Amino acid sequence: MPELPEVETVRRGLQPALEGQIIKSVTVRCPKLRIPFPKDFAKRLAGKKVEQLSRRAKYLLMHMEGGGVAIIHLGMTGHMRVISSNAPIPGKHDHVDFCTTAGATVRFHDPRRFGLMTLTTEKNLATHKLIKNIGPDPLGNDFNDEVLSAALKGRATPIKAALLDQKTVAGLGNIYVSESLFRSGISPKRQAKTVQGGRAEKLTRAIQDVLRDAIEAGGSTLKDHVQPDGELGYFQHHFKVYGKTGAPCPTCDDSAHIIKKIVQSGRSTFYCSNCQR
Ligand SMILES: [Zn+2]
């Protein structure tokens, strides 16, 4: 499942091919992904200029001339690839092509079809059902330690679960929550409500640092993430705890303290019980 850094990497990779370009045609080859395509999806985009390609949590937003907005989610296995010219014959899982008048094709490939594409308008975007309940973007201007403390206040749930909740902060999944808690020295089992003051400050900084480092590395390629130019992401080589069960803790730096794996609300968590409190 791509998390925020992977989606941001895709956005940055698609930007040169789409922003300021005119969509010549859109070809949709299946009736639905996770949800059906809107009627006239292709028709409503064709002939329009892409004013901006932005991101809200894990959704890509294609802001069109005239006020339309395409909402795109990569699901579990979705890729978007830029083909500069002469797109090859589409394969079985190549469900959508966006062709620009400049000759580029942005091809959406999704074997499991858990991705989605739908349409809204600038006016209705903030209240759209997919968007309205999403918490602040951790790399945006409306996220800081005060916002995080307020969101965690009074919550009698482990901090790991609270951070996976997209209303607390948007775009984090298992990987980056594990890494952020490790960097801030906070136990994934700690009650969310006790992460206040200095701890909330440390955690905020850790979340932002981990995400920025991951974006810098092109995201993490565990299963399906590929950048739009076909490059893999490399942040998986920088994981400190995720998937490192049994490895010595890089902070404690002695063989007595190893990374443990526990299961919290059905998801694996990796941490060091010595330096994460
Ligand atoms: Zn440790």
Image: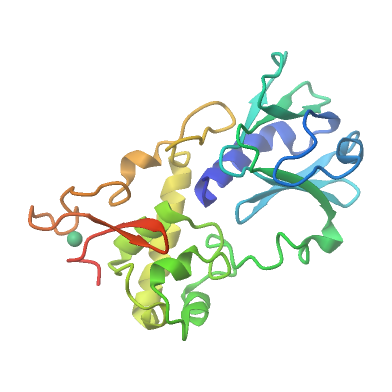
The answer to whether 199 is drawn above or below residue 92 in the figure is below
Q: Quadrant of residue 271?
A: bottom left
The answer to whether 211 is drawn above or below residue 199 in the figure is above
The reply to whether residue 144 is visible in this rendering is: yes
Q: Would residue 150 appear left or right of 117 to someone viewing this image?
A: left
Q: Residue 207: horizontal and vertical position, in percent?
A: 43, 61
Tell me the quadrant of the picture where the C terminus can be found. Answer: bottom left
Q: Residue 13: horizontal and vertical position, in percent?
A: 60, 35
Q: Residue 71: horizontal and vertical position, in percent?
A: 74, 49
Residue drawn at (32%, 50%), measured in percent from left and top? Answer: 242
Residue nearest the viewer, comparing 172 with 102:
172
The reply to whether residue 209 is visible in this rendering is: no
Residue drawn at (79%, 26%), measured in percent from left and top? Answer: 99
Q: Residue 126: horizontal and vertical position, in percent?
A: 76, 65
Q: Residue furthest front?
A: 266
Ligand 1's quadrant: bottom left
Residue drawn at (31%, 46%), measured in percent from left and top? Answer: 243
Residue drawn at (43%, 46%), measured in percent from left and top? Answer: 214
Q: How is the image coloured?
A: rainbow
Residue nearest the viewer, comparing 147 with 261:
261
Q: Would residue 133 appear left or right of 129 to someone viewing this image?
A: left
